[in-house]
Amino acid sequence: MGRYTESVCRICRREGAKLFLKGTRCYSKKCSFERRPTPPGQHGVRRRKVGEYGLQLREKQKVRRTYGVLERQFRNYFNEAESRPGVTGESLLRSLELRLDNVVYRMGLASSRPQARQLVAHGHFAVNGRATNVPSYRLKPGDRVTVRESHRTRDPFKAAAQNRTSQPPEWLSIEPGNLGASIAALPRRDQMPLDLNEQLVVEYYSR
């Protein structure tokens, strides 16, 4: 399976926004986007006029890269959202928010989505008591995500339990004193990232 292996800071610079792919580094003075907000490459400093198609493409790439999804996988998410009743863009973001790796990130057990994906792939989590190592596993209301009991004493989780500072979204019910959470409800649009314009993604695929 293909996976981007180069500097993720270049992705933020290319999309012109902080996607928080490096965890705590993104909040420090070492953040590459803060130091060099221009696109990467020798022509990055040039100002180019961006047309309608360019805006749609960049927003599609921004959403896809925020959640760390490959192109074909992202297209499948869109096709599924389009076939459902309701607003297509909101349904698309909801599907991405309910991925297991994103939920682990929202729980505050990882400093970034790439780190959350790695923790899930290494088999540290269980869904409804069953070990799961698939980052794209789709959760639904009532599902419970926990760190497997035999893994709770490992350093990443001990540190996460002590340093949780982010406020979890309302659709996620955190279990106090426990490394777990339950999906309380389907996330609404106002409970999902507001800096993403999903309508441009819909327009991109509707050309």
Image (cartoon, grey):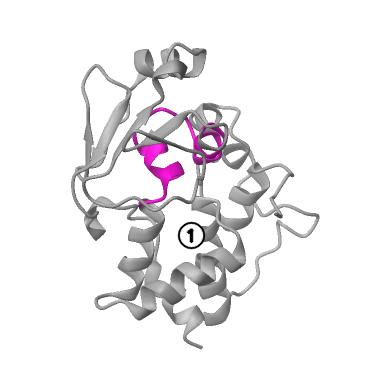
The image shows residue 125 at horizontal and vertical percentages of 43, 31
Residue 51 shows in this picture: no
**Residue extending farthest front:** 130
Q: For mark 1, does the 10 Å Cα neighbourhood hold few (<14), some (14 to 19), or many (20 or more) residues?
A: many
Q: Nearer the viewer, residue 168 or 175?
A: 175
Q: In percent of the image, x 31 and y 67: which residue is there? A: 90
**In this rendering, would 57 be left or right of 88?**
right
Above or below residue 156? Residue 113 is below
Above or below residue 198? Residue 39 is above
- Identify which amino acid the numbered label 1 is placed on: Val
**Residue extending farthest right:** 42
Magenta range is: 98-119
**In this rendering, would 175 be left or right of 21?**
left
User: Which residue corresponds to mark 1?
Assistant: 63
Q: In percent of the image, x 25 and y 78: which residue is there? A: 85
Q: In percent of the image, x 46 and y 67: which residue is there? A: 77
In the image, residue 108 lies in the stretch drawn in magenta: yes
The image shows residue 104 at horizontal and vertical percentages of 40, 36
Main secondary structure along the magenta-highlighted residues: helix
The image shows residue 93 at horizontal and vertical percentages of 37, 61
Instruction: Locate the N terminus and report the quarter of the image it occupies.
Output: bottom right
The image shows residue 52 at horizontal and vertical percentages of 52, 81
Q: Secondary structure at mark 1?
A: helix
Q: Nearer the viewer, residue 49 or 66?
A: 66
**In this rendering, would 70 be left or right of 157?**
right
Q: In percent of the image, x 49 and y 40: which residue is there? A: 113
